[in-house]
């Protein structure tokens, strides 16, 4: 059995999959934030309960909201303070008596989307999450590309460029601080949170993303103008990413990926921001939705198969 564990700031979910990545069962618990010991115990308890239920020792894959430094083995998970700067793979492996795999949660999302329901793999794919934050995972030759330090795909920490600032207006462009300590990172613009903040600062009204989208579809002119500007901003930023990575396919996940107008607008806007001979890759909504995190984490266990 394959255990995929999706570790978030508020919950930890373990799902059990067979070798064909078909989900059999799942369980979730709140994420302990009071101590590293309790955080480890929560994961160990979930794994041991699954072992007991299936009467075996399953393989364990972990998706985390950060990355593990490939050189030092130390995790960088800024939104779970108790696990930050800890050797989580070493500690979990010792407690569970087995190898534990781990990857960034966006990488797990991309890996899940690269393996279809029949187990067929796509060779080159870029997974982008437009949720609370903006991040990405890159699949090259059917495998996650993590980079030298394990942080490849941290696209949310690219910064706004000349064209983006020009679009937003030099004298009125909102410049948002990012949790990484820098300013104007894509994480605070292309995310669902960024969508809401930009609307607040450009349209002078505070609304949730679903409320903005509803006003857009209702034909509210100012909201429609805002959405068109946001789509242009996405096209500018994604155009740079596509130029650098040239993926065959882009899969969107996260709450904002449910805004269907993205799939209509981006293919029309992107050519203006690509090289003349470049083709716009397929842009699709995630096939596995909320299950992608655990499914991709479970798929990590297949890499030694």
Image (spheres, rainbow, N blue to C red):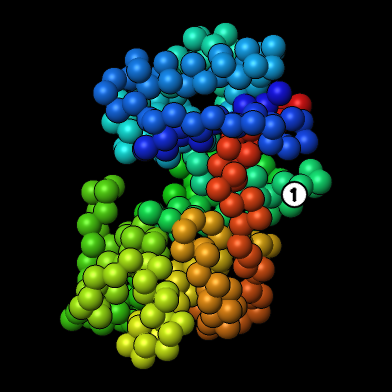
Q: Is the residue 240 above or below the residue 266 in the image? A: above
Q: Quadrant location of residue 12? A: top left
Q: Is residue 285 left or right of residue 30?
A: right
In front of the other: 81 or 117: 117
Q: Is the residue 221 above or below the residue 129 in the image? A: below
SS assignment at label 1: loop
Q: Is residue 56 left or right of residue 30?
A: right
Q: Could you tell me residue 85's position as x and y percent?
A: 33, 26
- Quadrant where the C terminus sits is top right
Q: Residues within 10 Å of mark 1 (few under 14, many from 20)?
A: some
Q: Could you tell me residue 30's position as x and y percent?
A: 39, 31
Q: Is residue 66 left or right of residue 153?
A: left
Q: Which residue is mark 1?
A: 116
Q: Could you tell me residue 101's position as x and y percent?
A: 57, 26
Asked whether the viewer can see residue 149, the reply is no
Q: Is residue 130 left or right of residue 26?
A: left
Q: Is the residue 135 above or below the residue 44 in the image? A: below
In front of the other: 94 or 224: 224
- Quadrant where the N terminus sits is top right
Q: Could you tell me residue 279's position as x and y percent?
A: 66, 75
């Amino acid at each position: 059995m394959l255990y995929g564990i999706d570790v978030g700031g508020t919950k930890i979910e373990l799902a059990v999959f067979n070798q064909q990545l078909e989900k059999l069962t799942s369980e979730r618990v709140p994420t302990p934030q009071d101590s590293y010991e309790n955080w480890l115990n929560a994961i160990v308890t979930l794994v041991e309960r699954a072992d007991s239920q299936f009467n075996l020792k399953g393989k364990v894959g972990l998706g985390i909201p950060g990355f593990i430094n490939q050189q030092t083995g130390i995790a960088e998970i800024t939104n779970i303070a108790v696990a930050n700067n800890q050797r989580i793979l070493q500690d979990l492996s010792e407690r569970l008596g087995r190898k534990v795999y781990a990857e960034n949660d966006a990488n797990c999302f991309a890996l899940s989307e690269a393996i279809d329901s029949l187990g067929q793999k796509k060779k080159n794919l870029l997974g982008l999450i437009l949720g609370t934050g903006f991040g990405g995972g890159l699949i090259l030759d059917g495998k996650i590309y993590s980079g030298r330090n394990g942080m490849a795909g941290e696209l949310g920490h690219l910064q706004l460029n000349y064209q983006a600032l020009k679009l937003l207006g030099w004298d009125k462009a909102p410049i948002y601080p990012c949790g990484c300590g820098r300013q104007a990172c894509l994480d605070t613009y292309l995310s669902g949170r960024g969508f809401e903040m930009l609307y607040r600062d450009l349209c002078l009204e505070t609304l949730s993303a679903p409320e903005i989208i509803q006003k857009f579809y209702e034909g509210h002119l100012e909201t429609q103008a805002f959405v068109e500007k946001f789509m242009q901003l996405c096209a500018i930023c994604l155009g740079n990413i596509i130029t650098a990575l040239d993926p065959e396919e882009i899969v969107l996940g996260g709450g904002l990926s449910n805004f269907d107008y993205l799939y209509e607008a981006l293919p029309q806007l992107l050519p203006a921001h690509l090289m003349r001979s470049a083709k716009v890759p397929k842009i699709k909504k995630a096939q596995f939705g909320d299950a992608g995190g655990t499914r991709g984490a479970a798929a990590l266990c297949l890499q030694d198969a």
